[in-house]
Each structure stands twice: as structure tokens, then as C-alpha cells.
Image (cartoon, rainbow, N blue to C red):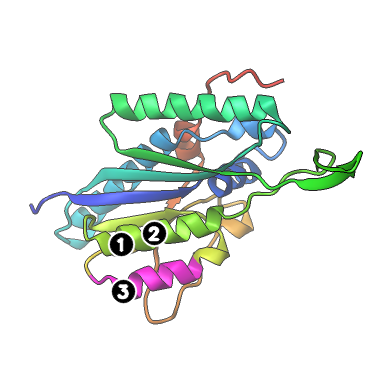
Amino acid sequence: MTDLQKVAIVIDYQNVHMTARDVFMPNDPIHFALIDPVKYAKRLIQVKNDDIKFSRAEKGLTLPDCQLACIEVFRGIPVAEADPDGYRRNLKQKSTWEREACLNHLDLHITYRPLKYRSRMLNGESRIDTSYPPQEKGVDVLCALAVTRLARSGDYDCVILASRDTDLIPALDEAHQTQTKTRIEAAKWFSPTVAFTRGALHVDKSWKLWTTSMDEADFEASRDRTNYDYS
């Protein structure tokens, strides 16, 4: 058997979190579906290795197992002035996940982008308007840059994007075209009863994007059940 395949995983956190909630817990509060990126990444590798074992047994293919080498997480964070509780929870989650990664001897990097808020004039000054929900801005760009950077580094046999954001398709195509050694793959949540979880991102027709499907059992294994004092 050849050496293990080194895998880097890029997680578009909000996309993974919100999609999980929509698919598996649509009637529950959003934080019930909170995803632990370390648990998620480990489970994804487990699912991939189970698929590899099946391919060996059924198809006689000689494929090495995958080894989790790097996790990069990109996520929006509330502005402390507008949402001090949300800001505090995000930092607490980051600390929890980094501690877990350290205990598991895993390379985890979490990058935040401040959420974008509308503004309004108050007494001649521009203030954050919290009557409108904030929007995540720039996270997709960071994910795209990470996929291409990790692919071009030559340090990994496989780079997996965990996201269903179609805006990231050009980045997948670019990473595939500029790096022949590193395989570019994706991961998604899947439920047989939810139509939009079928299929994969539609990359350029010149190549096929292998997508690992993760079901409800995988979601349950990936959840962060820590009490972060949600009100």
C-alpha cells in the first residue's frame, strides 16, 4: 500500500452550517445545527476512507487512505458594537475549536471577516443600523483564494471545498487547471428527501468534481453541542 493521501479541507462555515440546518433541522433554532469544524473534518475523512475501502473491495482498486493534514475555516463574525453577545460567542467557539484541534494534533486555521451592517444617520453621525440583519461579505473570496493557494502549494494530495456556493465554481476550475498533482474535490450534505442536496457543483465540462456526500448521521457526528449561552 502506498503512503497516505494528505488532505486539506477548506470550510465555508456559514454555508456548511446553514445548509445543515435547512436540511436536517429546519424547524429548530439555527444554533442547534452549529457545526464543530474539527469533528466535521474528521468525519469527512472517515466517510472518504470508507468509500476507499469499498472501492478496494468491490472494484479491486489500489487506493491509499486519506489523512487529514489541514483545516482552514472562513467565517463571518458580528461587530462587537452591534452584537456584543454574538461577537463573544464567536470568539468562544473559536477558542473551543482551536483547543480541540490541538488535542487532536490537527492543523486548524480559523479566519474571520466582520459582518457587513447597514448604517443610518443619527445626530449627524453614521451609526450601525441593527434593525436589518447583517450580511457576510468577502468570505467566498477568502475560500476561493485558499483553495487555489493550497492546490498550488503542492503540499497536499487532495484539497476539498466544503461549500455549495456556486460563486466558488471558478475557483475550483482554476485550482484544477493550474495544479495537476493535487486533486480538487468538494463535500456536501445530502438527504434523499431534500431535492437541492442532489447533484454537485457544475464545474467546467473538461473535468469531474468528485463530491463526498455526508448524511444525517454524519451531521450528528459533526455537531457542536457546547452551551455558548444562547439567549
Residue under label 1: 151
**Can you say whether 140 is above or below 97 in the image?**
below
| Pointers 1 and 2 in contact (C-beta within 8 Å) | yes
- Res. 148 in view: yes
In the rendered image, the quadrant that contains the C terminus is top right
Checking the image for residue 178, the label placed there is: 3
Residue under label 2: 147
Checking the image for residue 189, the label placed there is: none
Residue 177 in the image: x percent, y percent?
A: 33, 76
The residue at the point 69 percent across, 49 percent down is 135
N-term mark: 3 or 2: 2
Residue 74 in the image: x percent, y percent?
A: 49, 46
**Can you say whether 95 is above or below 205 in the image?**
above
Q: Which of 186 and 152 is in front in this view?
A: 152
Q: Which of 117 and 52 is in front in this view?
A: 117
The residue at the point 20 percent across, 49 percent down is 65
Tag 1: amino acid: Ala
Tag 3: amino acid: Thr
Residue 38 in the image: x percent, y percent?
A: 39, 35
**Can you say whether 55 is above or below 223 in the image?**
below
